[in-house]
Amino acid sequence: MSRSVPPMKAGPREKAEKKLGHVLADVERGIWKPEAPPPDQGPAIEPSFHEFASEWFEGVAPELRERTRIDYQWRLSNHLLPYFAKHRLSAITVEEVDRYRREKVRESKAVAAARQRQLAMPEKDRKRLVRPLSNGSINKTIRLLAVVLEQAVEYGYLDRNPAKGRKRLLKEDRPTRSYLQPDQVAALLGAAGKIDADAREGDTRRRRPLLATLTLAGLRISEALDLRWRDVNLEARRLRVAAAKTDAGVREVDLTPALQELLADYRSRSPYTQPGDLVFPTGAGKRDNPSNVRNRFLDSAAKLANADLRAAGREPMPDVTPHSLRRTFISLLLAAGADVPYVMAQAGHTDPKMTLGLYAKVIASKTDHGAALDGIVAAAA
């Protein structure tokens, strides 16, 4: 008895050839039409802003410069994520971005008010001071939000970028370039000296020498806090900036006679004087925080200095920052008769526009401008 053999199933190739035959037949009859594409379903799962921004940052971080990477991380972690973390991308509308902007303005005003209350207290009773965000800083967070959401638009999660455009940004005041006048420099350093003298037992009393180094040597705050005694040659009146953010920043800076004397006195009473020790460490010998220097040392000295200036009928200082002390150094050097190339070399600039806006080649000057600089400050004291 013979068995019936079941027919073999058509393989993929046979199916494709059969389908092609039907298409060709329809083409010959003039009735063929292309298949309609499936409807656009969009992204299958819509991520939260936290998920999307984290993946975005992970992708771009290796290509960013270190300072930019830290800045982006700060904007995301401290500002954008606390507000938008749980938002689905489609929930971030223009209205929601404007709401975020208003919230940051309210927050900044509250911080400013709290800061004023803290500054009115004795230094020993103050908590950590926090600076309020400027309009420019708030705008930077919104601009980064727009960058992140632009990729969300490209990926199809959003039809448009709700954070993009000038209407989302706050009006920014034009930054004022604050430079201290010689009498203001003298008042600031004098006030720092008074605070050092009144400091409690165990305090490093480094306010006056640190602020003097920022003002009379033009170091950036990070450079001053990274400075080690092996890089300070008091006999030769020189210090070397070895830890700088750019190659041009690695340089030798001439010490003025007054700064030389001040640093020598400070070293004689510092518990940290080994070559590898930091020049301006904390009481535990560790690197200090720039915010601590700004909020506790500089703000306190500026407040006392302005009180002294007003009492003497002189103009008080503008808002003073570590960088404005660096700009003061440059202006004092120029007032003392230093030429532009020398100033550039001392400040670690390669672009003359950072000094006078003039092009010049960096040439080390042998002229001793230190005594003249000291004279300008001392004459106003």
Image (spheres, helix red, strand yellow):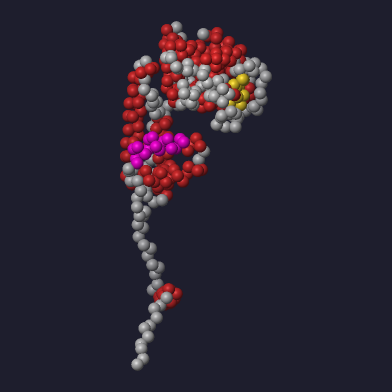
Comparing 315 with 366, the one in front is: 366
Residue 327 seen by the camera: no
What type of secondary structure mainly makes up the magenta span?
Answer: helix
Report the residue at 45% width, 6% height from top.
312
Report the residue at 51% width, 19% height from top.
271
Report the residue at 40% width, 38% height from top.
76
In this rendering, would 149 be left or right of 368?
Answer: left
- On screen, residue 100 above or below 344: below
Relative image position of residue 171 (x, y in whole percent)? 40, 30
Comparing 274 with 208, the one in front is: 274
Residue 344: which quarter of the image?
top right
- On screen, residue 329 above or below 108: above
Comparing 200 with 61, the one in front is: 200
Q: What are the residue bounds of the magenta stretch?
A: 70-85
- On screen, residue 179 above or below 23: above
In this rendering, would 346 be left or right of 204?
Answer: right
Relative image position of residue 95 (x, y in whole percent)? 32, 39
